[in-house]
Image (cartoon, rainbow, N blue to C red):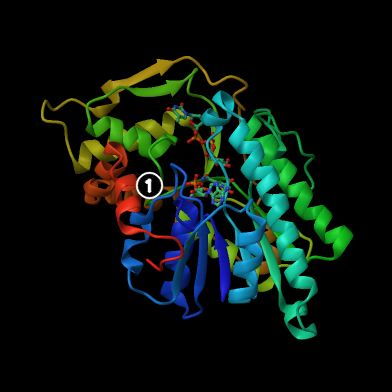
Amino acid sequence: MILVTGGAGFIGANFVLDWLAGSNEPVVNLDKLTYAGNLNNLSSLQGDARHIFVQGDIGDSALLAQLLAQYQPRAVVNFAAESHVDRSIHGPEDFIQTNMVGTFRLLEAVRHYWQALPTDSKAAFRFLHVSTDEVYGTLSKDAPPFTEEHTYEPNSPYSASKAASDHLVRAWHHTYGLPVLTTNCSNNYGPYHFPEKLIPLMIVNALAGKNLPVYGDGMQVRDWLYVKDHCSAIRRVLEAGQLGQTYNVGGWNEKPNIEIVNTVCALLDELRPRADGQSYASQITYVQDRPGHDRRYAIDARKIERELGWKPAETFDTGIRKTVAWYLDNADWVANVQTGAYRDWVSKQYTSQDAV
Ligand code: NAD
Ligand code: DAU
């Protein structure tokens, strides 16, 4: 049994689905179901006894203690977070509460549980914290990619809150000996990505005939990784990572935003051409830049490749084609998110601690 937090969100849901596709080890999935949590992501697991869904907050110490005692997980994988940089700029409070206070409460609950485990279970236990490359700050054009030794220089409320959570995880290892692992990953993309983020927003807006808002000059660089590859990296770190170590995860796919948007438009032109024969690229609109916008992220993923033998399975070309095709094939999922019906579905279908 493993306990996953935030498993109804984009990466967490992909992780739970992939985990149960490859193993019969059950998953307890603790998720608060904020706007980003969507049980439709997990609808294929409806009635599957290996998936136990619990609606709740990682900041709820009593609930955490109860779940840990009841399910006795051998590992905890912490995805739960507020994840969107723009939202953190407009309203940082939730980021502080979940990413910092929530991670602290989770660490404390897990520490008490772990300290009381029998010797063998205690030695085998793992706490894996899922973090981001944004904690390292921004890179100049020609600087080498971030290694695990790069200083922490977070620039947004989101990245500062994630950096703080990474420091708490590190401290719980050094001070209490909690067996922790941390992954710092670059930008993910793929199925179930909430359409506030760049790639799904561009797909959804393009199909709706809306503007495609590109911040500033569109020359900010991100390093893109297909979400299933992030999930395989997390499984590998959980299996073989060295305690107390951090692992950068990335796809060696640095691209300026405008190139990403043009690629999405070109794929849509091919797979779902506009009725008027024009390219979706004609909908691109340059808008005001994000305040404090980091110019470039790039991940040096050699440590996880060298020490744990992990490599991504997808190139950017294969991954982005699959992603655009997924959004075209899953118009219902998109419509449920856009209309808010995915929230109604939650309140109609779900009572506390039901398995879904
Ligand atoms: P997401 O916003 O899609 O999902 C977050 C999930 O956490 C949601 O299901 C939400 O309901 C849940 N949640 C939020 N607050 C909670 C709380 N207090 N208690 C319990 N559950 C709560 O995020 P994502 O993109 O899937 O990111 C998952 C993790 O991976 C985050 O920690 C994020 O920082 C990290 N990360 C994301 C990316 C990326 O590109 N998306 C890259 C690197 C790291
Ligand atoms: O680097 C990892 C991080 O990637 C994760 O830790 C975050 O959780 C995740 O949200 C993501 O952060 P970004 O800010 O990089 O992702 P976002 O999709 O919001 O933006 C990607 C780039 O595109 C960024 O440079 C801002 C730009 N952008 C974004 C949106 C939503 C636009 O130009 N227009 C847009 O409408």
Q: How many marks?
A: 1
Task: Name the residue: 87% across, 59% down.
Answer: 174
Work out whether 231 lies above or below 149.
below
Could you say where residue 221 lies in the image, as x and y percent from the top left? 55, 32
Q: At 50% from the left edge and 57% from the top edge, which residue is drawn?
A: 12
Q: Can residue 281 be seen here?
A: yes
Local packing at callout 1 (Cα closer than 10 Å; few below 14, some 14-19, many 20+) is many
Along the horizontal axis of the image, is 46 left or right of 181? left
Residue 207 pos. (x, y %)? 23, 34
- At 45% from the left edge and 55% from the top edge, which residue is drawn? 8
The quarter of the rendered structure image containing the N terminus is: bottom right
**Amino acid at circle 1:** Ile
Can you say whether 229 is above or below 292 in the image?
below
Label 1 sits on residue: 320
Q: Quadrant of residue 355?
A: bottom left
- Left or right: where 67 falls relative to 218: right
Looking at the image, residue 332 lies above or below residue 44: above
| Residue at image coords 67%, 31% | 138
